[in-house]
Amino acid sequence: MSSFSYIGKNDRRDKKQVINRLVERFILALLFVTIVLMPIPLGSNRAWAWSLLELVIVLGTTLHCILSFKNGRPLVRESWHWQLIIPLSLFCSYIALQYFGLSSHIASMDPYQTWVLLLKSLSFTCFVLLVCSYCTSAKRLRLFLTVIIVSGCLQAFYGTLLNLLQFELSPIWQVAEGGRARGSFVYPNHFANFLALCLSLAVGWLLSEMSTQKRHHSIRGTLLASVKMLLSRKLILRLAVIIMIIGLILSRSRMGNAGLFTALGAVALLALVIYRNPPRLLKPLVISIFILDMIIVGSMFGLEKVKQRIEDTSFAAEIRDEVAMDSLPIIEQHWLFGTGGGSFYGVFPNYQPNIYSGFFDHAHNDYIQFAVEFGVIVTVLLGMWVLYALFLACRSMMVRQDKLYRGVAFGCAMAIVHMLIHSTVDFNLQSPSNTLLFLTIICMCYLVRYLPSEAKSR
């Protein structure tokens, strides 16, 4: 009788383990689907779109809580996860204080928009928790990279196709194309920023696939290396980089293009200094992206139009710099606590001295908009958190021996530098899909620093 009970307990235990694995894989699949689908409905920058996004994240978080409680595991599984969760939780708490207005100094001037932003921020925090909890090995990190790059290629292909076929309106969302590729986004610069972030990770992964060993140049060795490259991930990643660069060029985004290649050059120079054993083809890869992609491919798809837009740029003709300058009095008056999350939309018209040719619901400068809405202190603290993630990526490039982690760290550093540059002239962090992708990259800075080596994870 005891033997039968023992077998029964083993069966129940095995059944429980199978259910746990299925739920865990479902949550992982949910994250992958979210990454691919989040930019499709207009960059999730409509109320119905970000509401669906929040519901999907809440579903994943609920399953994570149930799975954790059933197995007696903590919700935050690793100590370093708190370095991500605590800053985001404090940020959400600050937005909640603005919304409830317990003090007249910290009350939001637009409570409804602050409430909307609070819900978004809570869902973003949950998404970060899920990424940290379920990206637990080098294999899963590769899956995340694959999904992000596939999402970038889909956006680039769709935007390029509509632009080359000269659609006046996008066939799905009926958004005016205006001669610039925009994928499924409303704003071409958000499209360019999304592609640049995906591109950065693709370049980093491609770098990790390159050998660090010196080889003797022979005809036989060269032929074998060429055949191996044709059958490896390198060729697919290289094609993905070219596809996304074509989409980026066709977006005609000045800072999107300039920021990407500036970030690539800056991080490549940094890598040559801090890499202990740099890949042999690091410099040829960077040079090929500048020459082959930017000049040759760019000349075929209208790089001169981007160049012309940059040359024609003047502060006299630009309005976005006036919006940024006219926002400074708001910061002077509310520098400590800000006017409330999401309140720029309603507050700025009261300080607007002139009537512009267009309607501006954002400051076209993320630094200024964050300072307006949250105050200077909170903005500086958030900036320090992002810079710390950049430091972790650079540290991983220096000390990690695993090629995958070093390559992904390169891509993360490149993405952060690009975002720091691009945010000076645009409001990319006001787009839910771009914000969620950027937070995923911040998570990867921690993952490549703290995940076990690939051999141990196997």
Image (cartoon, helix red, strand yellow):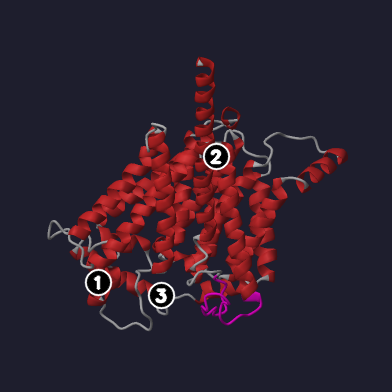
In the image, 433: left or right of 337? Answer: right
Could you tell me which secondary element the residue under label 2 belongs to? helix
The residue identified by callout 2 is: 273
Image location (x, y in percent) of residue 43: 48, 65
Q: Inspect the image, locate mark 1, and give the three-letter code of the amino acid beneath it.
A: Val
Q: Nearer the viewer, residue 79 or 105?
A: 79
Callout 1: 10 Å neighbours few (<14), some, many (20+)? Answer: some
The residue identified by callout 3 is: 315
The residue identified by callout 1 is: 347
- Precedes in sequence: disc 2 or disc 3: 2
Residue located at (44% from left, 76% from top)? 314
Image quarter of residue 421: bottom left
Q: Inspect the image, locate mark 2, and give the three-letter code of the amino acid beneath it.
A: Val
Residue located at (48% from left, 49% from top)? 441
290 shown above or below 275: below
169 in the magenta segment: yes
Image location (x, y in percent) of residue 254: 51, 68
Contact flag, marks 3 and 1 (Cβ < 8 Å): no
In the image, 41: left or right of 156? Answer: left
* The magenta segment: 163-182
136 in the magenta segment: no
Could you tell me which secondary element the residue under label 1 belongs to? helix
Could you tell me which secondary element the residue under label 3 belongs to? loop
Q: Inspect the image, locate mark 3, and give the three-letter code of the amino acid beneath it.
A: Phe
